[in-house]
Structure formats: C-alpha cells, structure tokens
C-alpha cells in the first residue's frame, strides 16, 4: 500500500507529515488526527471524488487501532438507465454474486466461532494454544480473500458498502486477537516455540 508522505500526501486529507494514511487502488485509510483529518461532516455511504474516481465512506473505525476512515472505490454506474432485459440480467447477476459472497462470509464466521477467547489461554495445552493461533491466521486469510472478492465484484454485491464495512471490522478484530496471542507468547515463554507441554498452572 502507498502511505502519506511529503511526496505523496493523503488524497483525502492531504496529510504529508507522516505515514498514518494508507491506500491502494481500491481503498483509502484516512487517519483521524488533529492537524489532518477526513471531512468532519461525512457519513457512512457519502461519496467523494478524487482524480475522476468516486469513493464512498464504508467505515469510520478502520485501521489497526480503529482510528481511520475507510473509503472504498465505487463507480458511477446507474442501474436505472439499463434496458429492461439488461435490468433482469443485472438482478440475476447480483443475486448470484451476493450468494457467493455470503457463502464465503458464512465460512469465515464459522471458523471465527471456533476461536478461543484471550482469557482462556492459560487453561490450554501448548498444542491447543498453537492450534488456536493457526485458526486465527486462517480466519484472517479467509477474510482477506473475502475483501478481495467483494472489491472485484462490488457493482453486483447487494448492499456492498455495509457488507464490506462488516468484513473490515471483523478483520480488524481478528488482527487484534492475533496480536494478543503474540503478546501472550512474549510474556509467558522465553521462546516463541515452547515444548508442547500443558501450560495450565505454569
């Protein structure tokens, strides 16, 4: 991803003193700061124009610490001007693509539901702890694929902005959970790969 700097200021807020704003071809994460910040009046779903491209605000709590606004690239396609036959085909495609998205989303949620809470780490064996860690990583990978699928098919996903906002927030939560696992490893073990022994009572 690109990041804000003197040479590349943020396309939303013009931040150029540090790298807190980041973006790629599909998303802009604009950091909410004191000197530089996204427009204060903007709401979820509002659109902004940047260099002939249209972006819509899909989340106000994105980024690692939830302190960035996320703008997703959209287009100016207008369904209302399609001929009747094309409208029918368009609706069918929307249903098809949205079903695929929801199936992938359900798989991700099912995986996430098997992830243990942070407070249970001390009750696990080392094998259970590392299995849980791998599950978190797998969930993050699946959520990343889901974002890529949604971005590539944004025109046909029903209620795209709300859908992508939800996935971004869940992905952020999973990354925070993975960070909690890393912190647990650092504080409890001398090495990141302890013997596969029972951790309870240690």
Image (cartoon, helix red, strand yellow):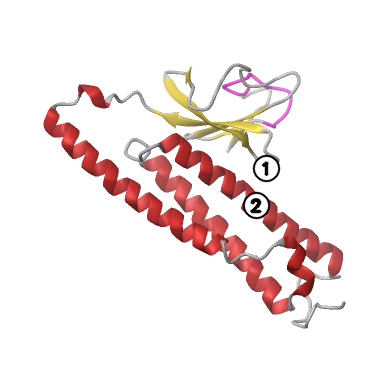
Q: Is residue 13 magenta?
A: yes
Q: Position of residue 137 (x, y in %)?
A: 60, 61
- The residue depicted at 52 percent of the width and 46 percent of the height is 167
- The residue depicted at 73 percent of the width and 25 percent of the height is 33
Range drawn in magenta: 9-20
> In the image as oriented, which residue stretches furthest toward the left?
85
**Of residues 37 and 24, which is closer to you in this image?**
37
- The residue depicted at 40 percent of the width and 47 percent of the height is 149
- The residue depicted at 45 percent of the width and 35 percent of the height is 161
Relative to 120, does residue 196 appear above or below in the rendering?
A: below
Name the residue that disc number 2 marks: 175
Q: Secondary structure at mark 1?
A: loop
Q: Kindly report the distance in space between the C-alpha atoms of the residues bearing marks 1 and 2.
A: 8 Å
Name the residue that disc number 1 marks: 64
Q: Residues within 10 Å of mark 2 (few under 14, many from 20)?
A: some
- Decide: marks 1, 2 in contact (CB < 8 A)? yes
Q: Position of residue 103 (x, y in %)?
A: 38, 56
Horizontally, residue 163 falls left or right of residue 170, namely left
| Residue 128 falls in image quadrant | bottom right
Q: Which part of the image, by quadrant, shows the C terminus?
A: bottom right
Q: Is residue 141 magenta?
A: no
Q: Position of residue 95 (x, y in %)?
A: 28, 45
Horizontally, residue 116 falls left or right of residue 150, namely right
Of mark 1 and mark 2, the one earlier in the sequence is 1
Relative to 88, does residue 37 appear above or below in the rendering?
A: above
Q: Position of residue 8 (x, y in %)?
A: 62, 24
Q: Which part of the image, by quadrant, shows the N terminus?
A: top right
Relative to 183, does residue 23 appear above or below in the rendering?
A: above
Q: Secondary structure at mark 2?
A: helix
Horizontally, residue 73 falls left or right of residue 39, namely left
| Residue 155 falls in image quadrant | top left
**Of residues 22 and 133, which is closer to you in this image?**
133
């Amino acid at each position: 991803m690109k990041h804000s700097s003197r040479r590349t200021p943020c396309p939303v807020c013009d931040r150029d003193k540090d790298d807190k704003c980041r973006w790629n071809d599909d998303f802009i994460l604009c950091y909410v700061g004191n000197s530089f910040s996204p427009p204060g009046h903007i709401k979820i779903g509002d659109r902004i124009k940047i260099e002939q491209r249209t972006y819509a605000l899909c989340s106000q709590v994105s980024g690692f610490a939830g302190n960035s606004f996320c703008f997703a690239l959209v287009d100016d396609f207008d369904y209302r001007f399609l001929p009747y036959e094309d409208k029918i085909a368009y609706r069918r495609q929307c249903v098809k693509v949205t079903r695929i998205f929801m199936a992938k989303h359900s798989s991700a949620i099912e995986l996430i539901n098997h992830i243990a809470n942070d407070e249970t780490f001390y009750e696990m064996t080392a094998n259970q702890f590392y299995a849980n860690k791998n599950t978190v990583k797998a969930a993050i990978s699946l959520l990343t694929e889901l974002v890529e699928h949604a971005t590539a098919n944004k025109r046909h996903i029903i209620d795209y902005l709300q859908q992508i906002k939800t996935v971004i927030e869940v992905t952020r939560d999973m990354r925070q959970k993975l960070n909690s696992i890393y912190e647990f490893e650092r504080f409890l073990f001398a090495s990141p790969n302890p013997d596969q022994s029972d951790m309870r009572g240690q």
